[in-house]
Image (cartoon, helix red, strand yellow):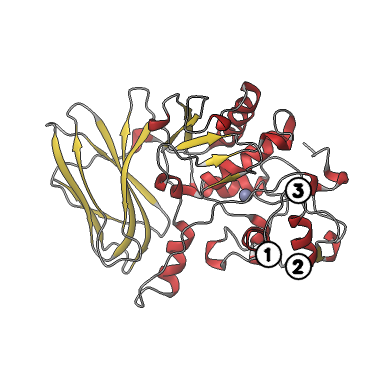
Amino acid sequence: MTNPDATQGSLRKKYCASRQPTPRVFGPNVGGERARLILLHGNKWANGTTLNFAFFDSQGPDPSWAGAGALKDQVRGAFKRWTDVGIGISFREVTDRASAQVRVAFQPGDGHWSYIGRDILKQGVDDRTLNLDPLDGIADGEYGIDVACHEIGHTLGFPHEHQNPNAGIVWNEEAVYRALAAPPNRWDRQTTYANIIEKIAPDRVRGSSWDPDSIMHYPFEPGLIEEPAKYRDGLQPRGGISETDKQWVKAFYPVERPADFPSLALFESRRLQLQAGAQVSLVLKPTVTRFYEMRTFGASDTVMVLNQRRADGTEHYVTADDDSGEERNAYIRRRLQTGETYLLKLRLYYAAHAGETAVMWW
Ligand SMILES: [Zn+2]
């Protein structure tokens, strides 16, 4: 799956300007290991979630966001590439964008971009969460699928791999600014800095090693990278989702066995034995339709997600609360329907003392 443009100067193509996550500011009592774990696992989805995606049409807030069938097929193909890796997140196309978390637009000239992970939930129903630029030759071929795979990678919560501080890339910075200021990208210095030159905080990167073939890595033309010297003549990722990408996405989102999820009885306090980053899924079966409350207990940083299980077995996001970095506990109050099955999913970022976290609903 080699990009046919590899030898012709990758900057003829548009780069992705990912929407930067809101910087997290922690109180003075949150530091070190606790902050590191929150940053590493923040923005990721609860495993097992089905993400609904929808395309804008000509009736949408901006008719220029609608795309031709060939463009949509490229995006569908990219979702399938991630699905085929074998992960615990699934994707479903819906026509009603109000029920979609991922809203895909094809605005010409706006470049390729996505918000990172659960940041997409902060966007309104008339907002895009992901844009692909049809002026960049993405309507057919592997290049277009790779571009869509890269943006979906951001939607799954992954940052740019070329900003991995472990890469040890030394840029010819002025050459990078000049190259990106030229067409087709026309980026200002701040956009170039935030998407290429700035190193991601070591706390946010996925591993200790660098993967220049990652789908989350840009190609670079000759003259932009000074070190490692072997990339002075340019760097072209191999194309497609790399083996390291696959290992990494499966580490965060392993395939689950829903039949093994334990049930949590009403008023039962369940003590959780979780490693940092690990997740538990508990089955809730309300017998009365009313408002219920759910919360965690103990000194931990947890994201708690409520999903609903559909008749076809897929899980759909209802709501979530993230108490990480705050001196409070995750709490959800929600009306639940009798006869329905819900999953209460907790991902633990950090527990001051192992085993000292519990969860209950009432
Ligand atoms: Zn990107």
Is 214 displayed left or right of 57 in the figure?
right
Q: Which of marks 3 and 1 is nearer the N terminus?
A: 1
The disc labelled 1 sits on which kind of residue?
Ile
Is 176 displayed left or right of 45 in the figure?
right
The disc labelled 2 sits on which kind of residue?
Glu
For the point 32% across and 69% down, which residue is it?
352
Residue 173: mark: 2
253 or 99, nearer to the observer = 99
What secondary structure is marked by label 2? helix
For the point 51% across and 45% down, which residue is it?
156
Question: Of tags 3 and 1, which is closer to the observer?
Answer: 1
Q: Are marks 1 and 2 in contact (CB under 8 Å)?
A: yes
Q: Name the residue under label 1.
A: 197
Residue 237: mark: 3
* Quadrant for the N terminus in the image: top right
* Mark 3–mark 1 distance (CA, rounded to whole Å): 18 Å
The disc labelled 3 sits on which kind of residue?
Pro
Q: Which of marks 2 and 3 is nearer the N terminus?
A: 2
For the point 34% across and 76% down, which residue is it?
29
Q: Which of marks 1 and 2 is nearer the N terminus?
A: 2
For the residue carrying disc 1, how many other residues have a C-alpha within 10 Å: few (<14), some (14-19), or many (20+)?
some
Corner quadrant of residue 78: top right
